[in-house]
Amino acid sequence: MKKGQVEYWEKKTRECGLRLTRQRKEILQTLVQATGPLSAREIFLKLKPVSESFELSTVYRSLHSFMERGLVRETDLGTGEKKYELNSGEHGHHLVCVGCGEILFLGCPLREFEREVKEKTRYEIIEHRLNVLGVCPSCKGSE
Amino acid sequence: MKKGQVEYWEKKTRECGLRLTRQRKEILQTLVQATGPLSAREIFLKLKPVSESFELSTVYRSLHSFMERGLVRETDLGTGEKKYELNSGEHGHHLVCVGCGEILFLGCPLREFEREVKEKTRYEIIEHRLNVLGVCPSCKGSE
DNA sequence: TTCTTCTTGCAAATGATTTGCATTTATGAG
DNA sequence: CTCATAAATGCAAATCATTTGCAAGAAGAA
C-alpha cells in the first residue's frame, strides 16, 4: 500500500491508536488528493458540501491529532492561515507564488549549514523552517 | 550617526516622511536597546509603565508604518506573535531556543540555492524566510 | 501661532484557532 | 452481534493576535 492511497493513511491512523471516523477519512482523502499543503478552512470548504454538519473545529482537532502522531505536517507559509499536508517523511521546503498561491516543493539545501550552526553556537538543532516566496512564470506574464 | 543610536532612526523616520511622535521615539528606543526581535506586545509592555495611556494598537500601527518605509523588519518565528526588529540592512536569519526563547542572529547560506531554484522553477524569487529552532547550551544543561 | 494632516486613544471588529460540554460513534470485550 | 466506554464530533462561545473606525490630539510647514 502506497502513500498516494487513502488506505495507507487510514491504516496508519488506526495503527497510531486513532479512531477512523467518517470525518477523518474525508480529511485524509482530501489531503491525499491535494497537490500542495491545504489550510484547515480549505479542507473544510471541500468537505462541507459532502456532509452537511461538518465543523471547522473538527478539521482542526483531527489535524492536530494527526500531527501529534506524525501523520501530518504543519507549515506556516505566511499566508495568514497555517497549511497542512500528509507527512511523506521527505524533508523539504516550499516555494510559494505570491500571485496565485501555487506551491512547489523544494528539496533542502541546509544539511551542511545546520552542522555549522550547531558547531558555532553549541545549540542542539531541532529543526529549521524555510519558505521561499516568488512569482510563478504565469503570474509574471499576466502582470 | 550610527545604527546603534536612536538618533539615527529618528532621523530616518523624519526622512521617510513620518512624524516623529513621542510614542514612535519610545518604540524606536526600545528596538535599539533590544538584543533581538520583539513582539508588538513585548514593546507595549515595556512602554506601558513609561506612559499611562499607551495603546497596543499604536505599537502595531507604528511598526507597520516603519515597515512600509523599510525601517523595520517583521519575522514570524512561529512563537505565535510576530517579531519586529530594526532593519540593519544585513540579510540573515534567526536561531531560536525553544527553551528560553533566546534569539541568535545567523548569516544566510542560501544565495546559491536561490539561484538554483530560480533556474529550475523559472519563478522570480522575491525573498526567503528561514528560521532554525534549537536548544541553547544553558537550557540543554538544565533539562 | 495657525492650519492641515498625520497619529493616537479607545472601543469594537476581525480572522484564525481553541475550548467546554452534551451528544454521538468507533471499537474492543464479551 | 450487542454493549460499554473512551474518544470524537457538533455547536456555541471563548481566546488571542492583529486590525479598524472615529473623534480628539499633536507634529510640522507656513
Image (cartoon, coloured by chain):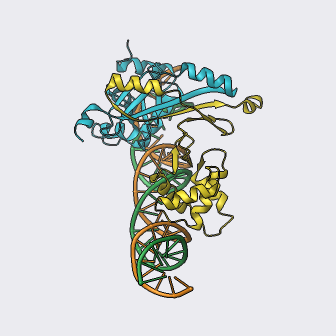
Chain colours: A yellow, B cyan, C green, D orange
- The residue located at (61%, 26%) in the rendering is B126
In the image, B50: left or right of A10? left
In which quadrant will I find the N terminus of chain B?
top left
Residue B86 seen from this side:
no
- The residue located at (51%, 31%) in the rendering is B129
Choose top left, top right, bottom left or bottom right for residue B11: top left
In this view, the residue in front, B9 or A139, is A139
- The residue located at (37%, 18%) in the rendering is B7
Image position, residue B66 (x, y; %) = 48, 29
Image position, residue D26 (x, y; %) = 40, 32
Q: Which residue is situated farthest in the right direction here?
A: A142
In which quadrant will I find the C terminus of chain B?
top left
Choose top left, top right, bottom left or bottom right for residue A55: bottom right
In the image, B35: left or right of A102? left
Residue A61 seen from this side:
yes
In this view, the residue in front, B123 or A99, is B123
In the image, B132: left or right of A106? left
- The residue located at (57%, 62%) in the rendering is A24
Image position, residue A35 (x, y; %) = 67, 45
Image position, residue B26 (x, y; %) = 35, 30
Q: Which residue is situated farthest in the top direction here?
A: B1
Count of labels shown? Answer: 0
